[in-house]
Amino acid sequence: MDTRKNTAYNVAYRVFSILLPLVTAPFLSRTVGTDGVGLYSYAWNISYFACLAAMLGLENYGTRAVAAARDDPDALNRVFSSIWRMQRAVAAAVLAVWLVYVFAVSGEERPIALSLTMMSVSCLVNLDWALMGLDRFRPIALRNTFVKLLAAACVFIFIRGKEDLWIYGFAWSAATLAGCLLSAASLRGRVRLVRVTRSEALRHFRPCALLFVSVLATSVYRVMDKVMVSAIAGYDQNGLYENAEKIIYCLSGFISAVGTVMLPKISALQKKGETERIRRHLDGTMQGIMAMTACMAFGVAAVADRLCPLFYGESFAGSAPLMAPLGFSLMMIGFANVIRTQWILPQERDRIVVRSVCAGAVINLAVNALLIPRMDAMGAVIGTLAAELTVPLAQWIQLRGELNYRRYLLHTAAASLIGLAMFGAVRLLGSVLPVTWPALALQIAAGGLIAGILFLLLWKATGSPMLRLLRRR
């Protein structure tokens, strides 16, 4: 399957992921309130940490290993079999630790945590890394769509108050397990399990664990924020932060969709030694990602004060001042993601990823510890922005002289100027419109039209390859 089809599947799924919360989040927020949203977020994020540990860094390591071996069936079967054996051992150990947490450590969140147990069980059979390495993105997209639809249905059917949140958790985790089994079945006929020794399986543990350090560090400032806000400022503040961050997280899915598709493609090019072609891909992707994330960041900042009360209800109006600055993390995430998935990881220079992300995690924890007690959830927003800025800076320090960072920064500056112009126009339009859904839709449409025209003019004036890409699509 070619890159365009893979990207289409991923982007279609990400669009669905963004639209679905528009249906479920307002109902859930009004039904369980800020305290209920914060409590569920707390239990969910601890479960998420367990799943991260169970999967180690397989999304990157496993994808890359399978992509490099996919042209040799015998090598592919051995790589797949040995990695999966290692995965099962690690996931089983993490599942045991999770059960100890649920029954011996958890507090008010215990019913929700227990209902999420199948999330950890699903890690035993989550073979998305193999599917991505084989360029099989369709089963993943369909599986995740099925899971989210089922979970959304359970919100409307079963949730009547905070005490019902465990049902939501159970439906989500059960659907996730079923989805993993269904998508894993699509590997039949493409890979074959062969007998491998324990030493073959353990050989993958060290490089996988190295990448897990970066995954864990990233999660520290994307997930631990909520745990720290809950513990320090209370569930109410975490509820405001959760709903502010939820929109940003959904939008970041577009970035990860592109990176997920490009990693196996670039890994295959790297094996063939086509460095110049990789550089061209990287430059084009950076230009496109910066355009997309600038529109998102400045667009969110322009409408956050209207979006939050309309979307979540008046009790979540306090999410708006958190959401507006948090949107700018998208540009930093996009910049770092392009460098990571199209230069660092295909070259197996995993230590650069680890150092960069760990630097961001240290900055995040320090800023959170300093500011959350004083500024509540806004302290976590500042900590996230500081962390996301640290990651591309740390990458640049380690890659000086290898890549044309000046050109990438020009792409970023041009996109930011267009985003700023869009922001001004959207805010000006909002000043004469009422706070209603039709008015908000008009603002968003006008902002998209203005940004689209300005980017087309820019790309035409500079002879950008983005125009040729758009015509092909």
Image: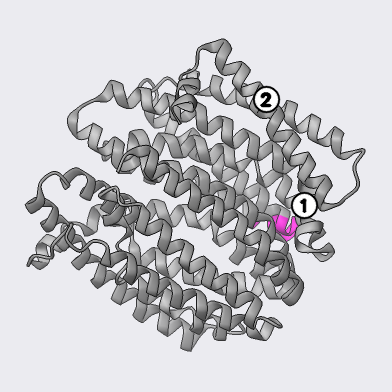
> Horizontal placement of 296 versus 187: left or right?
right
- The three-letter amino acid code for the residue at tag 2 is Ile
Measuring from the top left, give residue 5's x and y in whole percent: 38, 42
**Is residue 234 visible in the rendered structure shown here?**
no
Give yes or no for residue 373 being in the magenta stretch.
Answer: yes
Instruction: Measuring from the top left, give residue 24's x and y in whole percent.
Output: 66, 67
In x, y percent, where is residue 133?
A: 27, 49
Q: Picture quarter containing residue 348? A: top left
Q: Quadrant of residue 41?
A: bottom right
**Residue at the spot 62% in from the left edge and 17% down from the top edge:** 457
Q: Which residue is mark 1?
A: 307
The correct choice, above or below, for 365 with respect to 268 in the image is below
User: Going 65% across and 76% down the picture, which residue do you hit?
Assistant: 156
In the displayed structure image, the side of residue 369 where residue 67 appears, left or right? left
Q: Residue under circle 2?
A: 418
Label annotation for residue 58: none
Write down the region rendered in magenta.
369-377
Amino acid at the residue labelled 1:
Leu
Circle nearer the N terminus (2, 1): 1
Q: Quadrant of the C terminus?
A: top left
Report the side of 417 relative to 334 (left or right).
Answer: right
From what the image shows, is residue 379 above or below residue 265?
below
